[in-house]
Amino acid sequence: MGQVGLTIRPAMPYEADRLSHICFRAMAYRGSTTELLNGLEETDHFSVSPDDIEANMAYVAEDEEEGDAVGFYLMRASENECVVNKFYVIPESVGEDARAHLFFHACEMAETAGAECLTIEAEPEAMGFFEEMGAEPIGDSRAGAKFALLRLRL
């Protein structure tokens, strides 16, 4: 289920810039358009603040050998669901199963929080991965930005 040598731990507020950098690198690699990236700058979608980390369930995946962060997610819990509004892995780790390991961790944390489903906000380039993990598209998110909502029953 996971990548050997990968540790997932809670994110710390002082890592906000590091996580913002991961988000931008992942989106640029996936071919997100300049228009989308510029729109995200305005909506702060690809930036992470210390407040974001403190207000959400925030986890970082690190390469145990190098100590480098390879991905992260931010998720908020509400009643019977958890919503992942940021989920990014650096391009070099995409083929190493880091995404799946991080996704399964998010599912486990959502179940621990009492959620019956996991809702994911994703840009079009990331939808295929979440669908492979069993999530189903349920509509659009964020007026003005190009994001889809997907849902996975836990």
Image: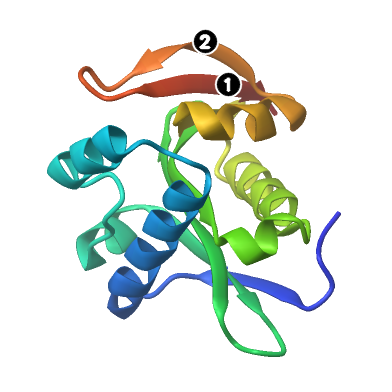
Among numbered discs 2 and 1, the one appearing first in the sequence: 2
| Residue at which label 2 appears | 138
Q: Residue at x 49, y 54 (%)?
A: 26
Callout 1 secondary element: strand
Residue under the point 71% across and 59% down: 98
- State left or right for residue 137 relative to residue 128: left
Would residue 39 be found to the left or right of residue 124 on screen? left
Q: Nearer the viewer, residue 10 or 65?
A: 65
- Residue 75 x/y as whole percent: 44, 45
| Number of numbered labels in the structure image | 2
Q: Position of residue 95 (x, y in %)?
A: 75, 56
Q: Which corner quadrant of the image does residue 6 belong to?
A: bottom right
Whether tag 2 and tag 1 are in contact, CB under 8 A, the answer is yes
| Mark 2 crowdedness (10 Å alpha carbons): few <14, some 14-19, many ≥20 | few
Q: CA distance from mark 2 to mark 1?
A: 7 Å
Residue positioned 44% across, 20% down in the render = 148
Res. 73 visible in picture: yes
- Give the residue type at disc 1: Arg
Task: Find the residue positioned furthest to the top.
Answer: 139
Residue 19 figure quarter: bottom left
Which of the image's four quarters has the C terminus?
Answer: top right
Q: Nearer the viewer, residue 138 or 40?
A: 40
Q: Secondary structure at mark 2?
A: strand
User: Which residue is tagged 1?
Assistant: 151
Q: Residue at x 66, y 42 (%)?
A: 107
Q: Residue 18 location in percent, x, y?
A: 37, 73
Amino acid type, label 2: Ile
